[in-house]
Image (tube, grey):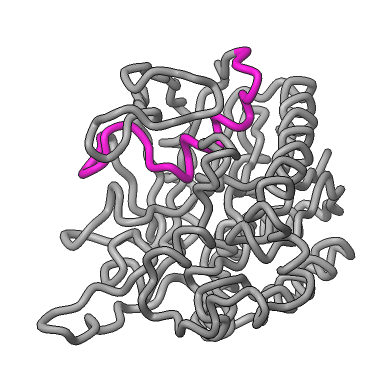
Amino acid sequence: MAEILGVGLTHSPSLIAPDELKNYSLTRALRSNDRIPTEQKNPESWPEDMRKEWGDDEGYTSAKIARGKLVDGFRKLRAEIDSFKPDVVLVWGDDQYENFKEDIIPAFCVMAYDEFECQPMAGRDGGQRPNVWDEPANKIFRYKGHESSRYLVTALLEDGFDIAYSYKPLHQEGLGHAFVNTLLYLDYDRKGFDYPVIPFSVNCYGSNIIRNQGGPYTQQINGVDMAMDPPGPSPKRCMELGAATARALQASPWRVALIASSSWSHAFLTPKNWWLYCDVESDMARFEELKAGNYEAWRGISNAQIEDAGQQELLNWMCLAGAMQELDRKPEIVEFLQTYVFNSSKCLALMKP
């Protein structure tokens, strides 16, 4: 039977930009989100821990501390992956109106490309994107696909999962940020990332995928918010998919690292907190369940609860949780970063054979 390694991490875009630019969700919301009442933008109205994190330098000191912890965690995860020596790395990530748009939104899609060419240091306009590595906009990152992607799709279809798959991009050249950021962070020191990759897309954003078009604000037509989209797959279904993936790959000849990539609750998805900070209480509840290896607690969470907490991207972790429950693996927490200022709670975890 093949060996499987479980890994969880964040793909938070804010870690691309240098901290001194203060280009994080809260600073952008304070500048440009007109939905937030003036009194809520006043730090005096914020929770005490949020004010401390903001400090007297608009979070700059806290940002440096947070980055240090996460980068240390990325290095630990990479060391474990290198030690495991996988034949292939599978990444569950969300597409945020990048490759999938109005023409089709699959619940799940295996991206079975032969090769991925990504240019993540170019902005949407093609210009230079400020980044902590000082890499140019025209730098291309290449990653290999793997034959196991076809095997996996076949196995899942035979197991009753109507999985979509693709052999080439639709709207996004290369990979969306959930996938490419994951690979960039696992190669933070730029040693190279030569492991073949299977990007496994999950429709995490569900009812907001088209109406938000990958951004923090709901699109409007004639001044009226666009209608809600259909929901994404439920936590239960994501866990069932993860379990089926584990069964299929365990029966394969390949050593596989299964990776869930996302932050947890997001401020810009949490209107009950005025889009300023994430659902701290819900994230802490999910963290305690994960730390205890109580995956079953996640299975009963509804889509409504997920959306209320702004935890849409946690569906990627639900896939991993289902796989690890199937394999009877307990998690090792590498880092858990609870934050008010930096948009989202972030967890780094390992589930070793």
- The residue closer to the viewer here, 301 or 44, is 44
Examine the rendered structure and indicate whether residue 49 appears above or below residue 253.
below
- The residue closer to the viewer here, 136 or 235, is 136
Q: Is residue 189 magenta?
A: yes
Start-end of magenta stretch: 168-191
| Residue 65 seen in the figure | yes
Figure quadrant of the C terminus: top right
Report the label total: 0
Name the residue: 86% across, 54% down. Answer: 330
The reply, left or right, for residue 80 in relation to residue 97 is right
Q: Position of residue 303 (x, y in %)?
A: 52, 80
Examine the rendered structure and indicate whether residue 41 appears above or below residue 71.
below
| Quadrant in the rendering for residue 280 | bottom right
Q: Position of residue 66 (x, y in %)?
A: 73, 46
Residue located farthest toward the front when viewing the structure as drawn: 56
Q: Position of residue 255 (x, y in %)?
A: 67, 28
Q: Is residue 100 magenta?
A: no
Name the residue: 20% across, 78% down. Answer: 220
Q: Position of residue 228 (x, y in %)?
A: 30, 82
The reply, left or right, for residue 110 in relation to residue 159 is left
Name the residue: 24% across, 31% down. Answer: 126
- The residue closer to the viewer here, 199 or 121, is 121
Figure quadrant of the N terminus: top right
Name the residue: 73% across, 21% down. Answer: 82
| Residue 4 seen in the figure | no
Examine the rendered structure and indicate whether residue 161 appears above or below residue 285.
above
